[in-house]
Amino acid sequence: MKISVEKGEEKGFLPDGRHTVTITSIEEGTSEHQNVPFFAARMESEDGFVTQRFYNSPAGHPIILSLYSAVGIKPHDGKDLDTKELVGKHLSVEVSDHTYTDPASGNERSIRQATGFRAA
């Protein structure tokens, strides 16, 4: 069997721990269960990558603001933040697994996540 490797697929997940990463792409979408808008940031280093979703909701805003602060973008009252500004920015993140119960199936799932955003 041959397994094709597309551009951007040549790296595995970042291992647990703190990593200095670069945000290489942003994808936008809507959550599957509650229709909450989100953006997913792909964060990479030479050692691998992690993709983290950020939900545009009252509960998600403090997390989004900590991401922007870590990359040196300061929010201003009345001015929208543009996710495109994040691409190419560097920061430090803590990578680990997060386990949760899938609301659709009730099954336990684990995802790789980035937290603890800090300036690089």
Image (tube, rainbow, N blue to C red):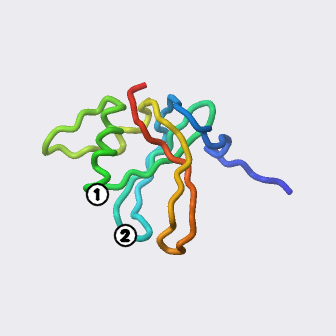
Compared with 43, 19 (above or below) is above
Most extreme residue toward the bottom, as rendered? 105
Q: Callout 2: helix, strand or loop?
A: loop
Q: Residue 14: percent from the left, percent from the top?
A: 60, 39
Q: Residue at x 32, y 45 (%)?
A: 64
Q: Residue at x 26, y 44 (%)?
A: 81
Q: Residue 2: percent from the left, percent from the top?
A: 83, 54
Q: Which mark is residue 34?
A: 2
The residue indicated by pointer 1 is 57
Q: Residue 66: percent from the left, percent from the top?
A: 32, 38
* Nearer-N-terminus badge (1/2): 2
Quarter containing the N terminus: bottom right
Return the residue nearer the eye: 37 or 110. 110
Most extreme residue toward the top, as rendered? 120
Could you tell me the amino acid type at mark 1? Answer: Ser
Quarter containing the C terminus: top left
